[in-house]
């Protein structure tokens, strides 16, 4: 019996959507599967075994369709597919056909799931593919470091006379402090940033301008090429936590600001957080930095984690921690809804006790004897959950509205920042936001209520807008799988 690649109902729905609204012309259905395969290969982790199982309503595709097996030499790409997967999974998939078909199906179905959760139908599908499949292969931006004269000349091209008064080198950008001839030129400069970036040959990357204490001096942040970046190492997380403000109840570390100083905040005062960014932006790494910060500072008696990850990938390593509620990472929307509803009940119970004690919140001395642990809900991909069930929004909104006093906090992340994922009710009740690189200014506005994230550099470059504070640009800490594993081991060792 010839080998087949199987899909389910949801897979077929996204295939039809791509053909109808994305490609906009008649192509074979299996061509979408090839694109999905390529998309999955761009993800560093391996697709999990849950993709071997499928619900009804799907279809089956032959290897002749998908890889060209059995066709003329010019059309048979099966050896290429086998070679790619053999290298990726360190197996001889020329000798083991069953394993080859299994990995092929997992990658195809994961890629289709990525299309479903990260591509918005209102966006051009060709641009989406260019960004997702070739996003890291773009030509490096030209350097402007130590080239103040070039900057001054470019400013003159947009009608601004200025002089460089100071120059700093950050981990990824060069910051120039320029003195303008007239204070009114600040508005002209802000309007002309796109033209300035074009004059300097910065491509799709943008220039950010920040005011200073002197009205006529502006700080311009110009990106350097990736080969000149200095990544923020993981050990800075540990050193920063040791010096975090003593009155911060839940300090979490993100990385360094443009001047190289460590940056973090108190999640307890956030008190909830929205995180949005496209694939490759560094969203998941930021989540790991937050989680590692929390488990390093808190034992299970003082911190509980409710982890929800519909993709079964990013949060799985934390499942064995005693901090984790139910000792597992939830992936199904129905399980997540049930757990969130139980949290709503916990919130109501704590509120009633606080009211009886005359206490304002969990930190009130009159509530200290209750011994309540803070609870942090982390959702790795909110869009996937909403696709499974819109009912997930109701308990999230209730918690966002009222859970702060009870010591319950939300961290909601997605690579699909649109109005369906981050509804108005969620956004209005979660004032603290983190935006990593996105494709459109409209997505930046969904996350931050302002544009700018569409001009970020990716790989952890982010705009952070905390409650009551101005937006700041941060370069995220680099956290590897080994750092995550070591952080979990260290947390367990401290508990013992």
Image (cartoon, grey):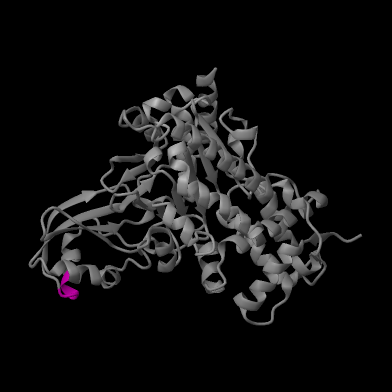
- The percent coordinates of residue 158 (x first, y second) are 19, 74
**Residue sitting farthest toward the right:** 1
Q: In which quarter of the image is residue 101?
A: bottom right
Q: For residue 289, which quarter of the picture?
A: top left
Is 173 placed above or below 91 here? below
On screen, residue 142 versus residue 22, left or right, reads left
- Image quarter (top left, top right, bottom left or bottom right) of the C terminus: top right
Query: Image quadrant for the N terminus?
Result: bottom right
Q: Nearer the viewer, residue 239 or 427?
A: 427
Residues drawn in magenta: 155-159
Q: Where is residue 441 in the image (x, y as percent from the top left)?
A: 40, 67
Q: Is residue 344 visible?
A: yes
Main SS category, magenta section? helix
Q: Is residue 369 left or right of residue 190?
A: right
Q: Is residue 107 left or right of residue 177?
A: right
Q: Which residue is drawn at 78% across and 55% down?
A: 54
Residue 390 is inside the magenta segment: no
Of residue 92 and residue 296, the one placed in the foreground of this image is 296
Is residue 136 visible to the viewer in this orientation of the structure?
no
Residue 181 versus residue 374: which sits nearer the camera?
Answer: 374
Instruction: Give me the residue at 7% from left, 67% from top.
Output: 181
Q: In this view, does 68 lie above or below 26?
A: above
Residue 156 sits inside the magenta stretch: yes
How many marks the image carries: the answer is 0
Q: Which residue is drawn at 21% across and 49% down?
A: 168
Query: Residue 303, how many percent across, how many down?
Result: 50, 30
């Amino acid at each position: 019996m010839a080998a087949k690649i199987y899909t389910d109902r949801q897979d077929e729905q996204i295939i039809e959507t791509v053909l109808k609204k994305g490609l906009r012309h008649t192509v074979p259905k299996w061509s979408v599967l090839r694109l999905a395969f390529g998309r999955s290969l761009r993800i560093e982790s391996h697709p999990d075994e849950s993709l071997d199982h499928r619900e009804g309503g799907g279809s089956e595709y032959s290897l002749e369709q998908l890889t060209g097996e059995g066709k003329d030499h010019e059309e048979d790409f099966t050896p290429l597919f086998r070679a790619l997967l053999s290298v990726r999974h360190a197996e001889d998939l020329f000798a083991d056909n069953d394993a080859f078909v299994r990995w092929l199906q997992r990658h195809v179905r994961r890629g289709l799931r990525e299309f479903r959760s990260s591509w918005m139908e209102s966006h051009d599908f060709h641009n989406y593919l260019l960004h997702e499949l070739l996003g890291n292969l773009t030509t490096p931006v030209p350097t402007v470091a130590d080239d103040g004269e070039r900057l001054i000349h470019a400013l003159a091209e947009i009608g601004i006379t200025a002089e460089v008064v100071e120059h700093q080198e950050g981990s990824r950008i060069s910051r120039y402090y320029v003195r303008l001839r007239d204070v009114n030129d600040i508005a002209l400069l802000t309007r002309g940033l796109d033209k300035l970036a074009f004059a300097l040959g910065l491509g799709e990357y943008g220039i950010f301008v920040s005011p200073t204490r002197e009205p006529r001096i502006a700080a311009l942040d110009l990106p350097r090429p990736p080969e000149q970046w200095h990544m923020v190492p993981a050990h800075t997380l540990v050193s920063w936590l040791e010096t975090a403000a003593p009155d911060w109840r839940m300090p979490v570390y993100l990385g360094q600001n443009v001047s190289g100083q460590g940056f973090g905040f108190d999640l307890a005062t956030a008190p909830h957080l929205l995180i949005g960014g496209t694939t490759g932006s560094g969203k998941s790494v930021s989540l790991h930095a937050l989680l590692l910060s929390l488990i390093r500072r808190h034992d299970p008696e003082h911190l509980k984690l409710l982890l929800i990850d519909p993709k079964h990938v990013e949060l799985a390593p934390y499942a064995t921690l005693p901090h984790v509620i139910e000792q597992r990472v939830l992936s199904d929307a129905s399980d997540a809804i049930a757990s969130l509803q139980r949290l709503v009940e916990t919130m109501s119970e704590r509120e009633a006790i606080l009211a009886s004690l005359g206490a304002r919140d969990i930190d009130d001395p009159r509530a200290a004897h209750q011994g309540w642990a803070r609870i942090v809900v982390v959702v790795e991909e909110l869009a996937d959950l909403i696709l499974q069930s819109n009912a997930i929004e109701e308990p999230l909104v209730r918690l966002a509205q009222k859970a702060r006093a009870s010591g319950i906090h939300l961290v909601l992340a997605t690579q699909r920042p649109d109005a369906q994922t981050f509804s108005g009710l969620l956004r209005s009740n979660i004032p603290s936001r983190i935006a990593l690189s996105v494709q459109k200014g409209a997505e930046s506005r969904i996350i931050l209520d302002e544009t700018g994230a569409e001009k970020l550099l990716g790989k952890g470059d982010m705009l952070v807008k905390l409650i009551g504070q101005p937006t700041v640009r941060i370069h995220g800490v680099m956290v590897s799988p080994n750092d995550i594993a070591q952080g979990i081991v260290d947390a367990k060792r401290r508990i013992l």
